[in-house]
Image: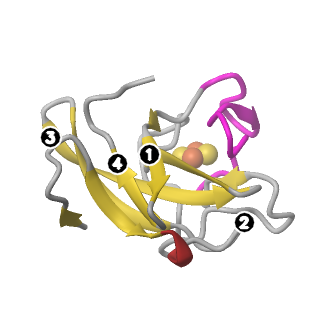
């Protein structure tokens, strides 16, 4: 991750690094006063980012780095116990924690780059 000149946004990667429903890009954010793992993926053309922390037990979702989609490529999945999440919202739809959410982060694709906006929280 490289600091952008604009202080309100932090560049994560080029948009071309995120194939639709393919491997995601991991990055780090300052959240709740500490550095935490995060990731961004592309789903149906749009980028979505979350803290890389399962809603079941707060551990990272991906066993293989960047591998967040299940085999159907329709859900984000936790490699530990199989919780699966809607890529657009982070809502857990099945597994051990249905109804809970991943923590969504504000990312925007601009000028073919993907940026994280720390000040904007949903
Ligand atoms: S830790 Fe993710 S499903 Fe249990």
- State the image quarter where residue 106 is shown: top left
Can I make out residue 72 in this image? yes
Residue at 69 percent of width and 62 percent of height: 69
- Determine which residue is flagged by label 1: 107
- Determine which residue is flagged by label 2: 21
* Front-lying residue, 72 or 45: 45
Tell which circle, 1 or 4, labels the residue nearer the N-terminal end.
1
- Gap between marks 2 and 3, in whole Å? 29 Å
Tell which circle, 2 or 3, labels the residue nearer the N-terminal end.
2
When the figure is inspected, residue 92 is found, relative to residue 14, above or below; the finding is: above
Residue contact at pointers 4 and 2, CB within 8 angstroms: no
Residue at 61 percent of width and 54 percent of height: 78
* Front-lying residue, 96 or 87: 87
Residue placed furthest toward the right: 72
- Crowding at dot 2, Cα within 10 Å, few <14 / some 14-19 / many 20+, comes out as many
* Ligand 1 within 8 Å of the CB at mark 4: no
- State the image quarter where residue 5 is shown: bottom left
Residue 100 is left or right of residue 105, and the answer is right
Tell which circle, 3 or 1, labels the residue nearer the N-terminal end.
3
3 or 4: mark nearer the eye = 4
Percent position of residue 114, x then y: 43, 59
- Crowding at dot 4, Cα within 10 Å, few <14 / some 14-19 / many 20+, comes out as many
3 or 1: mark nearer the eye = 1
Q: Which residues are magenta?
A: 80-100
Does the magenta run of residues contain 10? no
Percent position of residue 94, x then y: 78, 37
Quick one: quadrant of the C terminus?
Answer: top left
Residue contact at pointers 1 and 4, CB within 8 angstroms: yes
- Determine which residue is flagged by label 3: 34
- Gap between marks 4 and 2, in whole Å? 19 Å
Quick one: quadrant of the N terminus?
Answer: bottom left
């Amino acid at each position: 991750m490289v600091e952008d000149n604009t202080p309100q946004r932090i560049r994560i990667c080029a948009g071309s690094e995120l194939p639709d429903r393919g491997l995601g890009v991991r990055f780090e954010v300052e959240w709740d006063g500490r550095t935490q793992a995060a990731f961004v993926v592309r789903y149906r053309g749009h980028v979505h980012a979350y803290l890389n922390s399962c809603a079941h037990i707060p551990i990272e979702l991906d066993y293989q780095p960047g591998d967040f989609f299940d085999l159907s490529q329709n859900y984000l999945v936790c490699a530990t116990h199989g919780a699966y999440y809607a890529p657009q919202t982070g809502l857990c739809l099945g597994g051990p924690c249905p109804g809970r959410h991943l923590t969504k982060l504000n990312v925007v694709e601009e000028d073919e780059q993907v940026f994280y906006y720390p000040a904007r929280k949903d």
